[in-house]
Image (cartoon, rainbow, N blue to C red):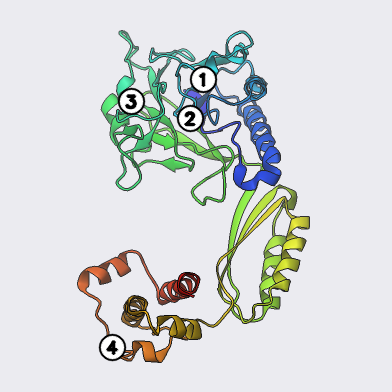
Amino acid sequence: MVSFLHTADWQIGMKASRVADVAEHVRKARIDTAKRLMRMASQLQVDFVLIAGDLFENNLVHNEAAHRVAEALSACSPIPVYVLPGNHDPLTADSIYSRSAFTDYLPSNVHILRTSEPVVPVPGVVLLPAPVMSKESYNDPTEQFRMPSEIGEDSILIGIAHGSLRIPGKFQDNDFPIALDAAQRLGLDYLALGHWHSFYVHNDMRTVYAGTHEPTGFDDQCSASAAHVTIKARGSSPDIERLDTGTLSWQTLELNVAGDPDQVVARVKHEVDKVQDPSETLLRLVLKGHAESDDLRWLEELEEWLRIHLLYIEIDKCRLITRPVGKRLRRLAADNPFLQSIILDLADIACSLGQPIEDLPEDLISARGSGSSVIDDSLQDSLDRWEIKADDVEEALRTLASIAEEVLS
């Protein structure tokens, strides 16, 4: 039996420029979480730790970051840690793994997987690495695996690679594409992958992305996680336990501002009150819809309150409309046939969805009638496939009004 910790995509040294005011705090959290993850490895008494690529943001990070990472990896000593270079920190001429932190000062329990030669982390287990040598590649990294000339009949085979599974719509040809049946074809008991920042177990139950230990932004696809894996014997199904690892919480809250602003403020404060650790929470507040007034002083006061209570706040007002749409479109479209045509098309789509758009100038759509529709089958299929609702079309009309006013006024 073997037990190990699988993690990836730490991206230490990331700039975090989007949240520049707290970027240093974000970078420090990534190191703190790394240390905690290594202590977790000790508590779980795993046999070894696998880091499946992108330990660093790039090969240009400061030397101090390299030394801090090496120190963090030593926190689980004497448990061995195996680090695979990824596409962010590939084994190129300027590789960070050529620096003194990973040569002269490398902790005794840390091993950089610089070649595709098989490694025996513990007796009865063979590790097949595929280190990354470039920023991008059209080749399947698992094709680099080198099977040992002699292998015990009961030896557990584990592959470690960095790239994108060839799931339609989720990979690019030059992004280290990995065959969906790689683990099965190569007879692996487990394939530890990095590159995708979300926890994912493929259908074969042997091919796994551990996710990133700390989310990199306001992306719902990011998960602060790692995988604790136990394999009882050669050929047996891995027991995979997802571990929650994050320090920071990146949250997005979308609100429609229609109605009383006090209700919007109350809703936001209610959501913030539910946050477990406000000092470690970054919030992106997305406001949309049609405000009743241009007076947004209530929003300024809300933002001030949020800045005091949270680590970071970002308010997105791009989809917020503060003036009536109908009058604006009527005025702008009066002498612009192209704009009229776009409005008619959007109105038809809304009607086909069973909900004519409110606040739309009736004189602009009278030519086709509020109940008519010129939606062909292919467009209707697209609307169904993408689950487009009437509210989405209304949002498009409001955005169109804003753009048209800026361009045509």
Question: Which residue is under mark 3?
Answer: 142
N-terminal label among 2 and 1: 1
Looking at the rendered structure, the kind of residue marked 2 is: His
Q: Residue 167 appears at what percent x and percent y?
A: 31, 43
Q: Are marks 2 and 1 in contact (CB under 8 Å)?
A: no
Q: Amino acid at mark 4?
A: Arg
Residue at disc 4, secondary structure? loop
Determine which residue is flagged by label 4.
Answer: 368
**Amino acid bearing label 1:** Tyr
| Residue that badge 2 annotates | 88
Q: CA distance from mark 2 to mark 1?
A: 17 Å
CA distance separating discs 4 and 3: 58 Å
Tell me whether circle 2 and circle 3 mark residues in contact (CB < 8 Å): no
Exactly how many numbered labels are in the figure? Answer: 4
Label 1 CA crowd tier, 10 Å (few <14, some 14–19, many 20+): many
Res 82 label: 1
